[in-house]
Image (spheres, helix red, strand yellow):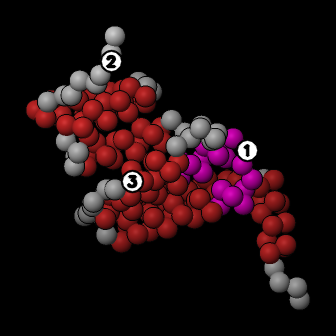
Amino acid sequence: MKFRLKPISKSGVPEALSKVAHYRYLNQPAEAESICRDVLIADPENQLAVRLLGLVITDQFTGGRSDRYDEAERTFLSLTDPYERSYYLGIFYERRAKVQLTAGVPPHALLVLFERAMRCYEEAEAIHPAGNDDAILRWNRCVRLLQSRMGSEWRKEMEAIEATDSPPV
């Protein structure tokens, strides 16, 4: 028996996209991802489906080798709106850093990811739609997370790395 994907109709795209949100709320990102892929077959230029696909891929990050960092980044880079591209790339870097933090990745590696996220948020803030402060909210969360870590062993490790990076006097 051969199994083949069945295409959804273009008229079914809005309802399918509402199901993506439903499965994300249920913490079932693989189901949401499958729907995004069906929508993109029916409507390859659908930017909401592209954005949601990137998000559901990041929803599945664990901090392990199986995480699909390259695929998530490429997905967000394919967003056509400059604000969304910058903002969601920031989300990508921030989520990557957070799962790796949980997985025990050394602080110096994470700081680079947080800085990339924050740079993306700054770019998004510069071109944000009126009344949309999402990039500022994400920036502030990164700052608070970094500040909370700087009072622990993280700070000692960062100071040790900075000392070895300093040129001799």
- Most extreme residue toward the top is 1
**Quadrant where the image shows the C terminus:** bottom right
Query: Spatial distance from mark 2 to mark 3, Cα to Cα?
Result: 30 Å
Identify the disc placed on residue 45. none
**Label 2 CA crowd tier, 10 Å (few <14, some 14–19, many 20+):** few
The image quadrant that residue 158 belongs to is: bottom right
Bounds of the magenta segment: 94-111
Q: Secondary structure at mark 2?
A: loop
Q: Earlier in the sequence, mark 3 or mark 1?
A: 3
Left or right placement of residue 69 versus residue 89 in this view: right
Q: Position of residue 34 (x, y in %)?
A: 35, 30
What residue would you read off at disc 1?
A: 104
What residue would you read off at disc 2?
A: 3
Residue at the image position 32 percent from the left and 18 percent from the top: 3
Q: Is residue 50 magenta?
A: no
* Majority SS type along the magenta span: helix
Work out whether residue 67 can be spotted: yes
What residue would you read off at disc 3?
A: 76
